[in-house]
């Protein structure tokens, strides 16, 4: 039995030692953020975490025990590319955690353990601007000095992001994962404005081109050539439109192109006889056409307002000429920025005595609001849902993750929390595995490997 005349860890002695440790941590420590993990979805049998989130960050002083640098394997080259496997050991005050952090999280939903730091929680280390995951909590070191423990030692590894929700409200923390994970980037159409254009009328111009032979073997659109007009600057110009999938005796490859028609960029003027039409380039041959000229046709078209917010080609209409004559027909070219860059003419009309009025249909005009980080968004047409990774209101660029399907071009994407609503602009196909990782180099490794090994063979490594 211990000697009752000697104090073996009285309350006053323990408090003194705890105060000294707290003061030491404040003097020689670093302010870090403790970020508890919230378990949103788990499998009921083996308790596998399906979805977790980090939405709170609590500043607390910590002593960096690994003062000579990060521990662990460091930066190394693996079969998946360059990987950083840094470890970090931190010491925090037991009293500070129990009196400050524990009361703030013990009544929160989806918190598994609140009375001590928990494995799986995160620590933000500001000196390296990095997130570390707690892998083990040592709470008995030093071992019961004056019959009590005073600190927690947090043994941490560099956090490997796996599409968890990280939304603490602290920008320096949240920006660590803004460009990581499986994400898609979409350019949205905001509140647009209607484009406008005017035209003049000319005589002796090319009204349209009739294709007499589509040709064969084209891999790209050939150049359209018109013979020169007698009037200076009056030569017509146009571009070929192509069609694929047609096979016959002359062309057996359905992937090759043929000339379908000609859209006029300039109708020209001053022709007294129809100009000759020829097609050059495109690695094909045989295409031919006949130009038809007329008086009172649409001439030069000038776009007076390019508009904005166009996600599909608008409908372009020309006012009619006097009765008995033909109305002009054309279409608009929409840029990736959602503006009208050009009006192409398929039929310049005939018999106009005054310049026709050009009407261009309205773009999508109801985009509004700002998406919120991590809110659920839904496509009005596809029904696909996703979560918002980031939203740039200046460029209307939306990054999303955790997609349940594929958004369609012209889907109106509505935010569940913000009620923001914008339409997706038509765009190129995105990589289904658009995974951003600052260390891994899997895609380049696969590309280089495919260049060495022909996996179309039955056995690329030897004889069958």
Image: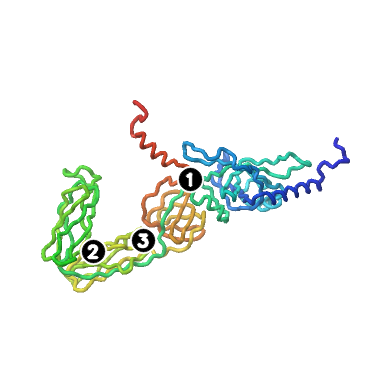
Q: Which mark is residue 437?
A: 1
Task: Report crowding for label 3: few under 14, some 14 to 19, many 20 or more residues within 10 A (C-alpha).
Answer: many
> Percent x, y for residue 222?
21, 52
Q: CA distance from mark 3 to mark 2?
A: 22 Å
Which of pointers 1 and 3 lies earlier in the amino acid sequence?
3
Residue 416, above or below 37 = below
Farthest residue, direction front: 68
* Alpha carbon distance from label 1 to label 2: 50 Å
Q: Is residue 169 left or right of residue 399?
A: right
**Quadrant, the C terminus:** top left
Q: Residues within 10 Å of mark 2 (few under 14, many from 20)?
A: some
Q: Which residue is mark 3?
A: 338
Question: Which residue is more in the foreground, 17 or 188?
Answer: 17
Q: Kindly indicate the quadrant of the structure image that contains residue 265.
A: bottom left
Q: Residue furthest bottom?
A: 354
Image spot of residue 401 (x, y percent): 47, 50
Question: Nearer the observer, disc 3 or disc 2?
Answer: 3
Residue 128 image position (x, y, % from top left): 57, 48
Task: State whether residue 176 appears in this view.
Answer: yes
Q: Residue at x 64, y 50 (%)?
A: 30
Q: Is residue 104 left or right of residue 82?
A: right
State the residue lying farthest toward the top: 463
Judged left or right of residue 68, residue 96 is right
Query: Does residue 101 lie above or below 463 as drawn?
Result: below
Residue 156 seen in this snapshot: no
Q: Residue furthest left?
A: 273
Q: Mark number for residue 329? A: 2
In the rendered structure, which disc, 1 or 2, sits on the residue that comes first in sequence? 2
Rendered residue at 26%/71% (across/down): 357
| Disc 2, SS | strand
Q: Foreground: 280 or 455?
A: 280
């Amino acid at each position: 039995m211990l000697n009752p005349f000697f104090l073996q860890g009285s309350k006053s002695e323990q408090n003194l030692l705890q105060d000294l440790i707290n003061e030491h941590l404040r003097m020689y420590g670093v302010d870090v953020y403790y970020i508890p993990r919230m378990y949103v979805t788990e499998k009921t049998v083996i308790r596998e975490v399906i979805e977790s989130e980090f939405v709170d960050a609590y500043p607390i002083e910590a002593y960096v025990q690994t003062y000579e640098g990060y521990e662990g394997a460091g930066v190394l080259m693996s079969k998946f590319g360059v990987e950083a496997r840094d470890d970090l050991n931190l010491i925090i005050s037991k009293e500070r955690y129990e009196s400050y952090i524990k009361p703030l999280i013990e009544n929160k939903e989806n918190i598994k353990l609140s009375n001590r730091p928990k494995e799986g929680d995160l620590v933000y280390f500001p000196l390296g601007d990095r997130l570390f995951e707690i892998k083990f909590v040592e709470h008995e070191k030093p071992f019961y000095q004056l019959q009590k423990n005073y600190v927690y030692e947090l043994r941490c590894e560099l956090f490997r992001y796996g599409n968890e929700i990280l939304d603490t409200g602290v920008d320096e923390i949240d920006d660590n994962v803004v460009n990581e994970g499986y994400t898609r980037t979409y350019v949205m159409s905001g509140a647009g404005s209607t484009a406008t254009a005017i035209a003049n009328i000319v005589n002796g111009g090319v009204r349209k081109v009739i294709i007499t032979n589509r040709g064969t073997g084209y891999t790209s659109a050939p150049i359209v050539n018109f013979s020169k007009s007698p009037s200076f600057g009056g030569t017509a110009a146009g571009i070929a439109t192509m069609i694929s999938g047609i096979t016959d005796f002359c062309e057996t490859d359905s992937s090759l192109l043929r000339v379908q028609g000609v859209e006029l960029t300039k109708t020209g003027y001053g022709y007294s006889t129809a100009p000759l039409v020829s097609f050059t380039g495109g690695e094909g041959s045989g295409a031919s056409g006949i130009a038809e000229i007329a008086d009172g046709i649409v001439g030069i078209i000038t776009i007076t307002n390019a508009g904005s917010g166009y996600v599909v080609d608008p409908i372009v209409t020309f006012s009619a000429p006097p009765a008995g004559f033909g109305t002009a027909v054309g279409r608009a070219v929409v840029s990736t920025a959602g503006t009208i860059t050009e009006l192409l003419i398929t039929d310049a009309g005939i018999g106009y005595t005054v310049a026709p009025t050009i009407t261009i249909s309205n773009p999508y005009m109801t985009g509004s609001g700002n998406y919120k980080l991590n809110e659920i968004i839904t496509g009005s047409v596809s029904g696909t849902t996703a979560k918002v990774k980031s939203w740039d209101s200046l460029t209307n660029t939306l990054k999303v993750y955790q997609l349940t399907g594929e958004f369609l071009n012209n889907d109106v994407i509505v935010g569940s929390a913000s009620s923001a609503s914008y339409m997706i602009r038509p765009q190129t196909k995105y990589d289904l595995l658009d995974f951003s990782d600052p260390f891994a180099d899997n895609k380049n490794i696969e590309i280089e490997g495919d260049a060495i090994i022909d996996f179309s063979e039955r056995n690329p490594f030897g004889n069958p």
